[in-house]
Structure formats: C-alpha cells, structure tokens
Image (cartoon, rainbow, N blue to C red):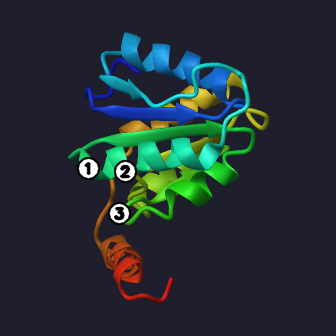
Amino acid sequence: MTQVPAMRIMIGSDHAGYELKEKLRNLLAESGHPVSDFGSESADPVDYPDIAARVARSVVGTQGAMGILVCGTGTGMAIAANKIPGVRAAVCSSVPVAHAARSHNDANVLALGARIISEELAAVIVRCFLETPFEGGRHARRVEKIRALESDGQR
C-alpha cells in the first residue's frame, strides 16, 4: 500500500470482523494512512448498525475520507452504511468488484466479509479500492442520480 497517497481512513467492524479489521488497520497505519477506528474493540458481540453508522457519518463529514467496514459477509454493514446520505458503500469480494465500485460508482465505503475472503485477498481489495479513482464521465451522471434518490423522499 505504499504507493497509495495517504488519505484519512475510517474503519469499523462487528465482532465477526474484529480480527480482520485489526489486521487491516495496522496495515493501513504502517502504510502511512491516518486511521480512525470506530470499533469494535474485541470479538465480543456488538450491533453492526451502530458501528456502520459511526463510520459512515464520519466519512461523509470528513472531506476526502474513505471508510472500511468488516463484518461476517459485508452485507449488513453495507446496508446500514448506505442509510446515511452521501455514503455509497459496496460489498467487495474480489478485485474487479472493488475496481468497479470505485471507478464506476464512486464508492466511498468498502464493506468486506471476514468469513468470505482471506486476509491476503482483503489487503489486495483494500489497496485496489484506495488506488482506483472515480472515472467520472458517463458514470458521473449515474452517481448524481444516486445522490438525487437521497433527497427526493423516494427511498
């Protein structure tokens, strides 16, 4: 991850994702990224929506920040995070999905499944997610339509 410009990373997990979150947090910090950890603090059971909301609100409130959420599958965290206006959370279990989430959807929160992917693959996915810029162009129009859904009451 040393080639990725330093950016503020907000990270959080539930109990199922705790070990992977800790490893990713350390890897990101070693790579020079300022990391804010929103829990969990152990493998003791916690409610993932609470942590997802804290991370998501922090990403939206911090210019240029990215979020990483880890639970058993990534799905619950992504669902909860996507309830926060301005968040585009994507569950990514492969590098091509992470690349498309960033380049086409301007995703700002990565959700990972600790029970689905290996630590090694998670690290590669995180790197891809952080390295890949949003392409804009035809994708910008679609991202704007996503933003409009947040404010039109039709959610």
x and y percent of residue 155 in the render? 51, 82
Image depth: mark 2 or mark 3 in front:
2
Amino acid carrying label 2: it is Arg
Q: Secondary structure at mark 2?
A: helix
Residue 14's image quarter? top right
Q: Residue at x 41, y 76 (%)?
A: 146
Q: Which of the labelled discs sits on residue 86, or is there none?
A: 3
From the viewer's side, name the closer residue of 45 and 150: 45
Please state if 63 lies on the left or on the right of 77 as rendered. Answer: left
x and y percent of residue 58 in the render? 34, 44
Reading the image, the residue beneath label 1 is 61
Reading the image, the residue beneath label 2 is 57
Q: Residues within 10 Å of mark 1 (few under 14, many from 20)?
A: few
Q: Residues within 10 Å of mark 2 (few under 14, many from 20)?
A: some
Q: How many marks?
A: 3
Q: Residue furthest top?
A: 30
Q: Residue at x 43, y 53 (%)?
A: 102
Q: Does the image show residue 31?
A: yes
Q: Does the image show residue 127?
A: no
x and y percent of residue 25 in the render? 48, 20
From the viewer's side, name the closer residue of 37 and 124: 37
Amino acid carrying label 1: it is Gly
The residues bearing labels 2 and 3 have C-alpha atoms spaced at a distance of 9 Å
